[in-house]
Image: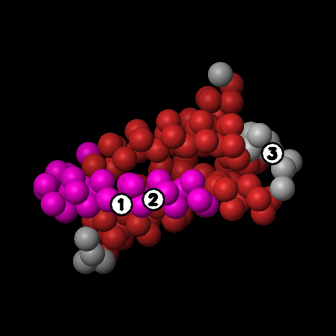
């Protein structure tokens, strides 16, 4: 349970970075919400990796191997999140913040189990 609590704290920090970046891009550049989310995701993913490796799982494993697996996981999540954001916000007109929260729920549960059992063993 302690690891999951740390994972949630790390997730809040990464989500804050992601959402702040999303807001900055949306209000300063005239791009689709899904495009803004794509670029904001990159910073969120990087901060999540660093937090998972050093704070959540305190991993001593192979850096390159873990980073590659982490990237594969989060690129997959990024693609799924971008498609969901595009469908919900750009096609159906749902507020992008609500769409963001929907994608976040999918990401939390998927990433915890994959990180714990396949990446940061």
In the image, 82: left or right of 86?
A: right
Residue lying farthest to the bottom in this orientation: 30
Observer-nearest of 10 and 24: 10
Left or right: 20 in relation to 50: left
For label 2, the crowd category at 10 Å Cα-Cα, with few meaning under 14, some 14 to 19 and many 20 or more, is many
Circle 2/circle 1 CB separation < 8 Å: yes
Residue shown at 30% from the left, 54% from the top: 84
Disc on the earlier residue, 1 or 3: 3
Q: Quadrant of residue 105?
A: top left
The magenta-colored residue range is 71-98
Q: CA distance from mark 3 to mark 2?
A: 24 Å
* SS at badge 2: helix
User: Which of 39/13 is in front?
Assistant: 39
Magenta stretch encompasses residue 96? yes
Foreground tag (3 vs 2): 2
Task: Write down the residue under mark 1.
Answer: 82
Identity of the residue drawn at 61% across and 60% down: 71
Query: Residue 59, which numbered label?
Result: 3
* Residue 110 in the image: above or below residue 83: above
Separation of residues labelled 2 and 1 (CA atoms):
6 Å
Q: Which mark is residue 119?
A: none
Quadrant for residue 64, please give it: bottom right
Spot occupied by residue 1 in the image (x, y as percentages of width and height)? 65, 22
Residue at mark 2 = 78
């Amino acid at each position: 349970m302690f690891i999951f609590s740390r994972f949630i704290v790390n997730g809040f920090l990464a989500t804050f970075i992601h959402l702040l970046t999303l807001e900055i891009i949306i209000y300063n550049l005239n791009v689709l919400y899904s495009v803004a989310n794509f670029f904001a995701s990159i910073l969120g993913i990087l901060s999540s990796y660093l937090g998972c490796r050093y704070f959540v799982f305190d991993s001593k494993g192979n850096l390159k191997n873990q980073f590659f697996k982490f990237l594969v996981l989060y690129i997959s999540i990024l693609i799924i999140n971008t498609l969901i954001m595009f469908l919900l916000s750009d096609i159906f007109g749902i507020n992008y913040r609500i769409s963001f929260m929907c994608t976040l729920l999918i990401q939390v549960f998927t990433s915890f189990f994959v990180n714990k059992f396949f990446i940061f063993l």
